[in-house]
Image: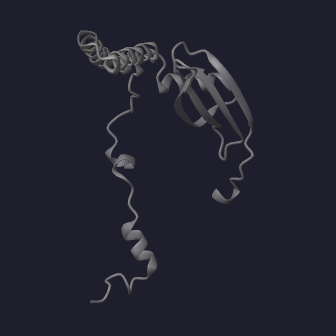
């Protein structure tokens, strides 16, 4: 049996198998993406409290030191979940607005990423911005706290990338 795409050449075979994943399909766009709230860590914290409390109670009633240790450990993990459950007060749209006010040029394309700092995993936005001209002559990086919108750092420079082959 002959291959159906053999006469069409190698490009037809590549084009037939080259498809975007469904999550990147812009025709299925249903609205802005909302980043999940970090306070959901409290759910895991409460689960650890319940299981740790049961393990601790069971260990104390039976004299099982391993179960007591597991219960204490789970309660410590629960405490960490509660300490690291920061309220995400600044969403990605506000982070982009703060970044565009922080850099000294009109912003065109931009991208925001949520990261975490420190032992308690305090959330911070890292926003990469490009100037609005085509091709972009400036680029910048702004990091801001996602809890209180404090700008933690800002860096901008002339864009060193060569865009001449894309014009």
Residue beneath the point at 72% across and 29% down: 155
Residue beneath the point at 46% across and 23% down: 91
Residue beneath the point at 68% across and 33% down: 140
Residue beneath the point at 45% across and 79% down: 10
- What number of labels is visible? 0
Q: Furthest-bottom residue in view?
A: 1
Q: Position of residue 45 (x, y in %)?
A: 35, 17
Q: Is residue 128 left or right of residue 11?
A: right
Give the quarter of the image for residue 61: top left
In the image, 151 versus 43, the foreground residue is 43
Is 42 drawn above or below residue 21 in the view shown?
above
In the image, 57 versus 50, the foreground residue is 57
Q: Is residue 85 left or right of residue 48?
A: right
In the image, 108 versus 150, the foreground residue is 150
Q: Position of residue 64 (x, y in %)?
A: 29, 17
Is 18 drawn above or below residue 153 in the view shown?
below
Q: Position of residue 98 (x, y in %)?
A: 58, 21
């Amino acid at each position: 049996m002959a291959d159906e795409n053999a006469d069409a050449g190698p490009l037809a075979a590549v084009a037939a198998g080259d498809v975007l994943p469904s999550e990147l399909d812009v025709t299925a766009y249903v609205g802005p993406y909302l980043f999940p709230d970090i306070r959901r860590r409290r759910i895991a914290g409460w689960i650890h409290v319940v299981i740790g409390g049961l393990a601790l109670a069971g260990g104390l009633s039976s004299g099982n030191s391993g179960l007591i240790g597991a219960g204490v450990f789970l309660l410590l993990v629960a405490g960490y979940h509660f300490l690291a459950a920061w309220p995400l007060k600044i969403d990605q749209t506000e982070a982009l607005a703060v970044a565009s006010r922080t850099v000294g040029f009109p912003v065109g394309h931009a991208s925001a990423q949520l990261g975490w700092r420190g032992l308690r995993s305090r959330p911070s936005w890292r926003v990469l911005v490009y100037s609005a001209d085509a091709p972009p002559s400036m680029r910048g990086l702004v990091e801001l706290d996602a809890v209180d919108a404090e700008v933690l750092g800002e860096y901008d420079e002339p864009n060193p990338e060569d865009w001449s082959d894309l014009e």
